[in-house]
Amino acid sequence: MCLAIPGKILEIFDSAGLRMARVEFGGIARDACLELVPEAAVGDYIVVHVGFAISKVNREEAERSYALLDEMGQLDELQAPLIEEEKTRKR
């Protein structure tokens, strides 16, 4: 099952003309596309689904949602290494 997961934007960068962000999900960082949420800024909390930020949320809502997903055991995919992402991340 694919779930949307809340995370905090650590940095914003350009990748092949796309506005991207490094997003932290409970201590794990992944890249996400910000094209659908152009108002997002560093420090904001966003909801990410299959690599795309789909909305902004406040910190309290992000923390509550993340804790619930963790309790349900739905965050295991965050632990999986992303080999391609690490190769392309070197800029």
Image (cartoon, rainbow, N blue to C red):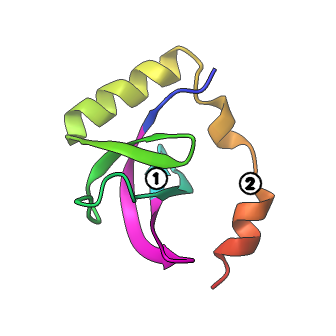
Answer above or below: position of 61 versus 56.
above
Residue 45: percent from the left, percent from the top? 29, 48
Q: What element carries label 2?
A: loop
- Three-letter amino acid code of the residue under disc 1: Glu
Answer above or below: position of 41 versus 1.
below
**Label 1 CA crowd tier, 10 Å (few <14, some 14–19, many 20+):** some
Answer above or below: position of 84 versus 14.
above
Which residue does the image show at 41% across and 30% down from the upper left?
66
Which residue does the image show at 31% across and 35% down from the upper left?
62
Question: Comparing marks 1 and 2, which lies closer to the viewer?
Answer: 2
Which residue does the image show at 67% across and 80% down from the upper left?
90
Q: Does the magenta stretch include residue 87?
A: no
Q: In this view, does 58 lie to the left or right of 72?
A: left
Residue bearing the label numbered 1: 24
State which quadrant residue 55 falls in. top left
Q: Nearer the viewer, residue 27 or 52?
A: 52
Question: What segment is highlighted magenta in the picture?
Answer: 6-22
Which residue does the image show at 32% across and 33% down from the upper left?
63
Q: What element carries label 1?
A: strand
Residue bearing the label numbered 2: 82
Q: Is residue 12 magenta?
A: yes
